[in-house]
Amino acid sequence: MSVMKGRTDQLDNYEPLTAVDIGGLILKNPVMAASGTFGYGEEYVPYIDLNRLGGLIVKGLSLEPREGNPPPRIMETPCGMLNAIGMNNVGVRAFIDRKLPFLRQFDMTVIVNIYGETIDEYKKVAEILSTPDGVHGLELNISCPNVKKGGIAFGADPDTAHEVTRAVKSVTDLPVIVKLTPNVRDIAEIAESVAAAGADAVSLINTVTGMSVDIEQRRPHLKNITGGLSGPAIKPIALRMVWEVVNRVSIPVIGIGGIMDANDAIEFLIVGASAVQIGTANFVNSRATMEIIEGIDHYLKIHQIRDINDLIGTLKTDR
């Protein structure tokens, strides 16, 4: 049954507590807008109240501006979407000058997703973002290729993931969330490695590598050939990985992957995620984040759960 169904006529005065603690960041509710799907926040002002978000993860930033990959770079797939955007962004300094002043107007937690091609680049971006007001935390995208190690993603190897996390933590006092790639043998091993390096939280999963082919042209639909699969198709994978990581680390876990409505979000909370990020759903429904916030609140009311933290990690199994 959908959480949007059920009687609430006797619960109008029942206001559950929805604040969660993510590595020292206190979010008013556990619903965050995922990096890469929400721009820099300004794009969604006509559709939602940014003040209601638990947090906003802005589009990934690099040291210098990037144009990204050539088109076509987005492809709709059954139950999802492939993208090979290539991390196009305005660069960290332009973000501070041109985008951050707008975000300071709102009462919300702003977390900046960052990436680099070397550990030094990660450190420099983190240092630059540690000074201005209005940035409350960093999210490390470690799915990026490490150019000094042959292009292998930072997040594909526990030692490299540990090294980049430790390096960033050494130059910032901001809470650091590490975003994990699912394209690994054991994602919980990577989570343990970054936790040991001082990560304040982990978020997962990033997109699953996939591809699509035009059978008439016999060519890939994406210019980049492969791309990252997101959307409902990956939710069962994401849910399983979040559950595995929750059972291996003591730091907060943020669930990402195919969350389209409040029911999906609640599944992630029950398996142990302390918060969730909403990504592809924003492209389908510009009000998805607001509806999910409302749906979680409704669920707490009809189940008479006073504090959302009493719901998190309540999965029942026979094991």
Image: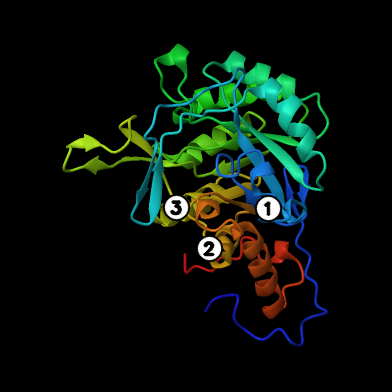
Mark 3 or mark 1, whichever is nearer to me: 1
Left or right? Give the position of 60 relative to 28: left
For the point 47% across and 69% down, which residue is it? 318
Disc number at residue 264?
A: 2
Amino acid, disc 1: Pro
Identify the element where label 1 is drawn. Answer: loop
Amino acid, disc 2: Asp
Disc number at residue 46?
A: 1
Mark 2 or mark 3, whichever is nearer to me: 3
For the point 54% across and 69% down, which residue is it? 316
* Residue 102 occupies quadrant: top right
Q: Position of residue 258 (x, y in %)?
A: 48, 54
Amino acid, disc 3: Gly
Gap in angstroms between the C-alphas marked 3 and 1: 24 Å
Please say whether residue 116 is visible from this viewpoint.
Answer: yes
* Residue 36 occupies quadrant: top right
For the point 44% across and 41% down, which residue is it? 182
Q: How crowded is mark 3: few (under 14 residues within 10 Å), some or many (20 or more)?
A: many
* Residue 172 occupies quadrant: top right
Q: Nearer the viewer, residue 95 or 14?
A: 95
Left or right? Give the position of 192 relative to 31: left
Identify the element where label 2 is drawn. Answer: helix
Q: Which of 295 and 157 is in front in this view?
A: 295
Disc number at residue 231?
A: 3
Identify the element where label 3 is drawn. Answer: loop
> Upstream in the sequence, badge 1 or badge 2?
1
Gap in angstroms between the C-alphas marked 1 and 2: 25 Å
